[in-house]
Image: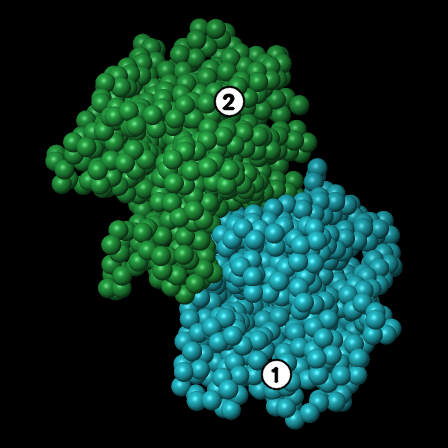
Chain colours: A cyan, B green
Amino acid sequence: MQNLIYVIPIIGVVALVFAFIKAKWVSAQDAGDDSMKDIASSIQEGAMAFLAREYKVLSIFVIIVAMLLGIGNMSGEDRSPMIALSFVVGALASALAGYFGMRVATKANVRTTAASRGGLASGFQVAFAGGSVMGMSVVGLVVLGLGSLFLLYQMIFVDAGMATILNTLTGFSMGASSIALFARVGGGIYTKAADVGADLVGKVEAGLPEDDPRNPAVIADNVGDNVGDVAGMGADLFESFVGAIIGAMVLGLGFTVAGESGLIEPIALPLLLAAAGIICSIIGTFFVRLKDDKSNPQHALDGGAFIAAALMAGAAFGLAKWLWPEVGATVGTGAEAVTVHWYHIGIATIVGLATGVVVGLITAYYCSLDRNPVNGIAEQCKTGYATNVIAGVGLGMQSTAVPIIAIVLGVIVADQVAGLYGVAIAALGMLSTTGIQLAVDAYGPIADNAGGIAEMSSQEPEVRERTDKLDAVGNTTAAIGKGFAIGSAAMTALALFAAFMQQSGLTSINLASPQVMVGLFIGGMLPYLFSSMAMKAVGDAAMDMIEEVRRQFREIKGLLEGEAKPDTARCVDISTSAAIKRMMMPGALAIVTPVVIGFGMGAEALGGLLAGVTISGVTLAIFMSNAGGAWDNAKKTFEAPGGFTMKDGSVHEKGSEAHKAAVVGDTVGDPFKDTAGPSLNILVKLMSVVALVIAPLIAAV
Amino acid sequence: MQNLIYVIPIIGVVALVFAFIKAKWVSAQDAGDDSMKDIASSIQEGAMAFLAREYKVLSIFVIIVAMLLGIGNMSGEDRSPMIALSFVVGALASALAGYFGMRVATKANVRTTAASRGGLASGFQVAFAGGSVMGMSVVGLVVLGLGSLFLLYQMIFVDAGMATILNTLTGFSMGASSIALFARVGGGIYTKAADVGADLVGKVEAGLPEDDPRNPAVIADNVGDNVGDVAGMGADLFESFVGAIIGAMVLGLGFTVAGESGLIEPIALPLLLAAAGIICSIIGTFFVRLKDDKSNPQHALDGGAFIAAALMAGAAFGLAKWLWPEVGATVGTGAEAVTVHWYHIGIATIVGLATGVVVGLITAYYCSLDRNPVNGIAEQCKTGYATNVIAGVGLGMQSTAVPIIAIVLGVIVADQVAGLYGVAIAALGMLSTTGIQLAVDAYGPIADNAGGIAEMSSQEPEVRERTDKLDAVGNTTAAIGKGFAIGSAAMTALALFAAFMQQSGLTSINLASPQVMVGLFIGGMLPYLFSSMAMKAVGDAAMDMIEEVRRQFREIKGLLEGEAKPDTARCVDISTSAAIKRMMMPGALAIVTPVVIGFGMGAEALGGLLAGVTISGVTLAIFMSNAGGAWDNAKKTFEAPGGFTMKDGSVHEKGSEAHKAAVVGDTVGDPFKDTAGPSLNILVKLMSVVALVIAPLIAAV
């Protein structure tokens, strides 16, 4: 077993090498003509400028929190100030993954445009290769970072024992979560402020088409796609992946065989499963290619992800059979004792994979152009603005039912086969193919950017047509990706919750205790407060952006005529400043609340808080994400060139009253699906991680 | 003590006599000219027709459920089939209260118009007298019904003991909840379908003013005010009042003095507090009058409610001092034992009253015309439709924070002084002055109707001006009333939850158990599903209404010219049918889910379900209710005759683009605040009551 543990970081390195090769390949592709290169470099500069400023602020934050963590864990049983190191490494790894992913995504966009001149298949290949870099960087750095630290702490804490090792390792998860908070919330604010500014003034007021180079906010808008959907999504799944692994590792601590404790297998297995997931994901990427220009990119993406998942299911059974104690291992005592056999691990993994697929499919159903929900919303546009909004809200609310039931069924089955450890393994199973999943997600904004660059650099119409096709697939994958991110956040939060219980020495949290009720109520309310802050941030930042764009149209002579260039850097700067400044408050809310409740009211109340925030946050996130997705695609039925024929034969046309209603719905949905909704994933996970990290401290107080 | 128990139903009768005298007085007032009488009788007929059809469907429902309850409790410890009687009496009492209240409200409306011809003060007096009938009918029937059944069961179950008496009494609460479900959900669907139909076609398409007699949906709209805001709100508070009393009574079962159990005081005290609240409310109503036409109606209403609350605080201390065991009574065992002294009861009552006031004030703050939140929304209308919607959603979400914190603080303090019994007493304290609270709430729709009748019967402008003044106050009281209804639903649900725990024999519900987590997740999701059903019902019904109104304008010759009369009965019928038909599914969801989870997964999972639905439902209800209220009043800034001057000096005018944006916000908010939001109160309480009723059965299984 111990030798096998050395393999873990090596597989992390394999993923990074794979990402490096892909990145090199992308860089080697043709970047097109000068005009394309110009635009692309503006986008890249904007994106990198945002990252630079974000990381500057973050570095101060990371140093302060690391010091606090170090001091807080200076002494005490099962604790070590080395947790500060874990925290810094976790933050660094997540930041690095974001940096790599973004850097390559902003190279892949223009190269996708250039390759699309030669056909759909070649454009697709570049875009997906760009996405793969993000995917593999994330999973590679997670497994390399966690695996190395695990080895290191095994050496350092030879005497202190496994509890100390795992407590110290939780810092990695908190470091990753901190970056995720800033990347997701900040990224969400950035992208929507730019988007609203570009749309409302550029498109609606000045009558410019989408991605028109005369629009001063258009570069910021394209930067936003990268900041929000590449770096933000990457940090989100990085956090989920880490959380699921750490949660399962901590829960692995309690196993015994024939009464003997100190088993390493249940603790190391989650890391090995994660490593196996990397190999499966890499294999999956080889199946993602278009045979010819007539093939459907969606099928290519789905196929690769499916193959990776199928391989993973097999790998989980194989690994468990190989490593798990032959006679099974037992966790818990008395009536609550559960004996877990190797095949239970495999089943739990499959449960997680299946839950992820169901949640993704439901999201796709609610957000797809050719399905009843979106069609119904599009119909409602014909009766007016308000009816469209009401229908979207109603639909979003309805859409919470099946995903929640799927998650709940997953929890029940996983718990039946392997107790809380099973739930954690299911969470990990769901996330095990994150490598390819995230590659598919990151493909979306690259294709979106490619379309923007084609438009801005005035390519032939057929190029834009091809990038539009690539982008259309990207929209659906984005919606599915959001559903998957929420589902995985829910499962990860449950795994972290169980780990928190164990580490704080609680065997039961009594719902009937008023303290727990109080925790539940406050936890249930926080996602609303958090969302309102995020949406207000977008509103305020968008206002600044709107004014700036109006000012440029007014003051820069010849801009609308195409004779002068807009000051795009100014718009990029507005979005950047707003995002950095306005993510502070919601961020503080997420970090401070569990600390205050935990130390002020005790571990039980903190448990109530976590349960409340998870339940309320996940439901609210599904609602906002799906409502936004449905509005977005309902609007698309009115924007297809030449009109869009609905199932009932009616044709939806651009510029109609119904189209205007659809645009209003889409605009309402933007901060729902791209800012507040995804940020809730972070809120839910971050609060659980903070609780897990402070659990030993609370237990000691 | 036992003699005092006989006084309880007598005080119920006193309230009913008071209501009867008020009703007689209202009837004796001048009902105005023939045109006014005509319109008023259409409204009354419509309202009564709705009640008749609703009660017909309900009676079948009540008979079936009563039979099931009777059979289910045929045998077993501490149970009796007499619970079916309690159920029927509870349903009957709530239905009767609705009938009385609605009958008098639909008389008071036209008489308010008539009295307003003589001045503001006289109009105000009639409207408030009408409202008082609803208020006193509700509290009178609650106390009479519960008090009589309690006496009856004391005689019947002399040997079986107090547990049987209380278990059997819980049926009353379930009966009341069933009516509330139908009245609130059905009423909410009714009123908004009519409202949207009247507004969208009559006002927007045909350009008619508000309440124009040529508008075919206008009678249905006015009926809707009564159905939703009088009968619906009445049934809602009836249910809260009953639930809080029953919850506290059941929790009173566990007290001992010097180790001796069988104390009657803690069980009877809640009933006596409720009775005392009636007396305080009646006294309060005498202080509600306008000195002259220049007085502010809002101050008169607030003054009466405040006096009643102050009296009640004193009464609670007095009653407790008089009746509570001198040495205190103890509940719980071991480390969790709590000794409650008489003054603790008084403190808990004040905590409840204060929590109610805070929640009401916050609601008023978020929904008042002259405050920052509404002003901010009104400002956002200037930047467009979508920004207004986003701002309202953000505001509504933000507004959940303080009420939840107030409720949580109330729970903490009440629990500190008297354990879970204290929480139940706080819930009862909040509701103890329901008599006058509901009178103030019901005043609103009466004043609203009075304005409608003034318009439809072409009164002098000064009459309409006066009714507008009365109505403006009504809008604020309606918003506060909604906040109060949510707050009281939350507290009642907590009391019922505690009672459920006790009756199902649970001392702890372990949040860490996956079953409980599953319950919590499903519970957290249900309010979303329930709201989506309610909103879809409104959408569909409104569509039917829109088509019918369009048809009438098209087919009835001379209608728009005022030469022909519209077929208002047809519109009333559409709203009625839609409301009755479409409340079935959400209703079934509320009743069946706890039964399925309770018997399928056990009492602990059911406890999780209740906690989940309470937390999620209360937060969602506050969000929807306040967002709706804020949009409503933001729109009003654009509709003041002659323009409305904002704080920053800008003038909001009718017909501007910003006004249109405000109308969209208001239309979105309508089903939020009048259908889905209030229905969630019922969902939360009804599920708790169903759980309480089936608790002994689950414990037996």
The crowd level at tag 2 (other Cα within 10 Å; few <14, some 14-19, many 20+) is: some
Residue A368, compared with residue B284, is above or below; it is: below
Residue that appears at 48% across and 33% down: B571
Residue A556 visible in the displayed image? yes
Residue A423, compared with residue B238, is above or below; it is: below
Q: Can you give x and y, in whole percent of width and height, for residue A485 in the image?
A: 65, 61
Q: Secondary structure at mark 2?
A: helix
Q: Can you give x and y, in whole percent of width and height, for residue A525 in the image?
A: 47, 50
Residue picked out by circle 2: B53
Residue that appears at 75% across and 58% down: A429
Are the residues flagged by discs 1 and 2 from a single subunit?
Answer: no
- In the rendered image, which quarter is residue B662 located in? bottom left
Residue B499 visible in the displayed image? no
Q: Which is nearer the eye, B164 or A678?
A: A678
Instruction: Please report contact status of discs 1 and 2: CB closer than 8 Å, yes or no.
Output: no
Q: Can you give x and y, in whole percent of width and height, for residue A164 in the image?
A: 63, 63
Residue picked out by circle 1: A456
Q: Secondary structure at mark 1?
A: helix
Kind of residue at disc 2? Arg
Q: Which is nearer the eye, B554 or B70?
A: B554
Judged left or right of residue A229, residue A536 is left
Residue that appears at 41% across and 18% down: B96
Q: Which is nearer the eye, B22 or B80?
A: B22
Identify the mark at residue A19; answer none if there is no mark: none
Judged left or right of residue B75, residue B646 is left
Kind of residue at disc 1? Met
Circle 2 marks a residue in which chain? B
Q: CA distance from mark 1 to mark 2?
A: 63 Å
Q: Which is nearer the eye, A676 or B32?
A: B32
